[in-house]
Amino acid sequence: MALDDEPLDTKARRAAQAEATRAALVAAARRLFVEKGYHRTGTEEVVAEAGVGTRGALYHHFADKQALFEAAFLAVEEDLVIEAAKNLADPADGALNQLRQGLIGFLDASLTPHVQRILLIDGPAVLGWVKWRELESRYGLGAIRAMLERAIDEGDLAANQPTDALAHLLLAAADEAALFIANAPDQLVARDQGVRALNALLDGLRVK
């Protein structure tokens, strides 16, 4: 019987098994990349940690270890988006305050091992700066731009603000602040400094 002639329930089971294998590999890779770093983690270790048999299962889903790292990177980004959505300020507080809270939340997340190691330390080195910035922009840029546009509608920002350029600048500022925190000898002090600097930037944008 050809694969295309399989019953739908068999196809669904195969798809579910494949998705479960992929998820197990990504979860195992995240744990090991955080614990050991990208370069000290071997694909054999990931397969063993995931409990999926042989490396053939890994290479069925990912072209190489870098592709697996990118999947782990995206999983961390998606977790950040979900967490940010839970913790956003009340919309009644205004878009600018929501933006402030979202950016500060990212700085707080930069203190966690997953964000530090995968997004901020290994991310630029493994993916390359251009790819790293592209992925960071994919998850943060649209949300920042939307909140800036809402802040203009609410009268907290001047109507002539170049929102596209401003969104890029704020995203870059948040990324640089997070890198500053992750690489600082005293990360808690660096976090407080980053928050103060970010607040100064946002306060300077507000219509007086």
Image (cartoon, helix red, strand yellow):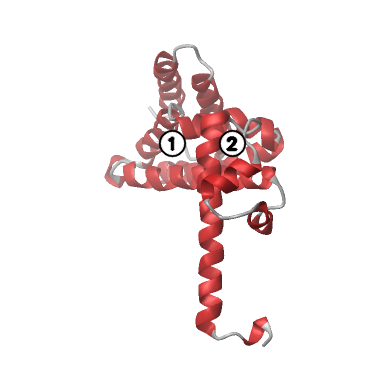
Q: Is residue 47 above or below residue 167?
A: below
Q: Pointer 2 and pointer 1: residues touching (CB < 8 Å)?
A: no
Q: Residue at x 44, y 17 (%)?
A: 187
In space, the residues marked 2 and 1 are separated at their CA atoms by 16 Å
**SS assignment at label 2:** helix
Say if residue 161 shows up in the picture: no
Q: Earlier in the sequence, mark 2 or mark 1?
A: 1
Q: Bin the neighbour count of mark 2 within 10 Å (Cα to Cα): few under 14, some 14-19, many 20 and up.
A: some
Q: Which residue is mark 2?
A: 168
Q: Is residue 1 above or below residue 118?
A: below
The three-letter code of the residue at mark 1 reads Leu
| Residue 14: assigned label | none
Q: Residue at x 28, y 44 (%)?
A: 90
Q: Which residue is mark 1?
A: 157
Instruction: Determine whether, in the image, residue 90 is placed left or right of residue 154.
Output: left
Say if residue 150 shows up in the picture: yes
Please tell me in which quadrant of the rendered image residue 112 appears: top left
Q: Residue at x 50, y 47 (%)?
A: 27
Q: Is residue 185 above or below residue 23?
A: above
**SS assignment at label 1:** loop
Q: Is residue 157 above or below residue 146?
A: above
Instruction: Determine whether, in the image, residue 132 is placed left or right of residue 184.
Output: right
Q: Residue at x 52, y 33 (%)?
A: 34
